[in-house]
Amino acid sequence: MALVIKSWSVKSHPGAGEPYVKVVARESGFWNFIFSLLGIDATTTFQVTGSRIEFEQGSLSGFIRRLTTFEHICSTFYGRFKPWKSALGIFGFCLFLGSAMQSGWALFAFFVLGAVISGLYYVLNRQLTFGFTDAAGEVAAITFKRSVIEGQEINEEQLHKIIGVIENLIKHRDDHAGEVDIGSGSQGGRMASPAPTSLRQVFNGPDEVTAKPVASAAVQRTAQTGACPKCGNSITPDDVFCGGCGHKLK
């Protein structure tokens, strides 16, 4: 069943905490629109962040969310479906009714009526689809048609831009290797202490769990300057990751 778009956005340079792509769709139909106004509608969400694609399908019974990192995405796609066969069938049926009445005026009236109905059907039922296929062969996609009520529509050019953003993030995913998303706060992240592996470590405390390696020259310089070597964000000697960009410091 084709969905209708509630809201969408595509940003090549999003702000902090914003996704590159976000598309929210609902099931088509008048009653589903009423449910959306009441805030109890089931939505499908397609969201692209800096490290993964989040695809969520909801229903009145619950939801299922798939989080797929870029290295597990095999391909992306988008396309269009035109219901010209159904529209032509509607037009032909109207002509048949008009010819059955054996009246020139009736034939003309049904000709006009068939043209209007088939034209509206064609315009309102054109469907677009986009999505991706992961390494396991699972397909996650949104198939939608134009909504007169919401007035939201994504055309082929905008779908091409969405796919382009995803492909660019996949292409440059190695540039972010080793980085960890720990938020955009100014304070650096903290790593949890490893679990003890012997009774001696249990009684002597967490400091005996692992021996602290000697800091490299780059790490020592980082601790002395108090700034992240990658983005220049303020850090402390105890920080393991930069709080601004997630760069690993130790």
Image (tube, rainbow, N blue to C red):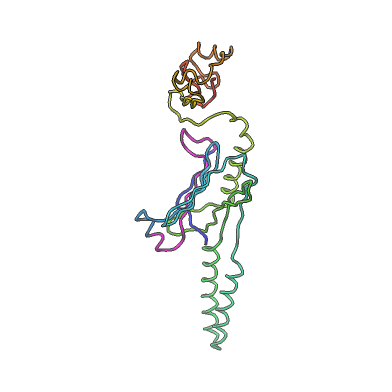
Query: Along the line of sight, which residue is nearer the eye, 136 or 90?
Result: 136
x then y, percent, for residue 247: 54, 24
Q: Is residue 228 above or below residue 135?
A: above
Q: Residue furthest front?
A: 199
Q: Residue furthest bottom?
A: 102
Q: Quadrant of the C terminus?
A: top right
Indicate whether residue 150 is drawn in magenta: no
Q: Number of callouts in the render? A: 0
Q: Residue at x 53, y 42 (%)?
A: 48
Q: Is residue 60 above or below residue 215?
A: below
Quadrant in the picture for residue 61: bottom left
Range of the magenta residues? 12-33
x then y, percent, for residue 203: 44, 20
Q: Is residue 204 above or below residue 74?
A: above
Quadrant in the picture for residue 122: bottom right
Q: Residue at x 60, y 57 (%)?
A: 80
Q: Is residue 31 above or below residue 138?
A: below
Quadrant in the picture for residue 102: bottom right
x then y, percent, for residue 58: 46, 53
x then y, percent, for residue 225: 50, 12
Indicate whether residue 17 is drawn in magenta: yes
Query: Along the line of sight, which residue is nearer the eye, 81 or 32?
Result: 32
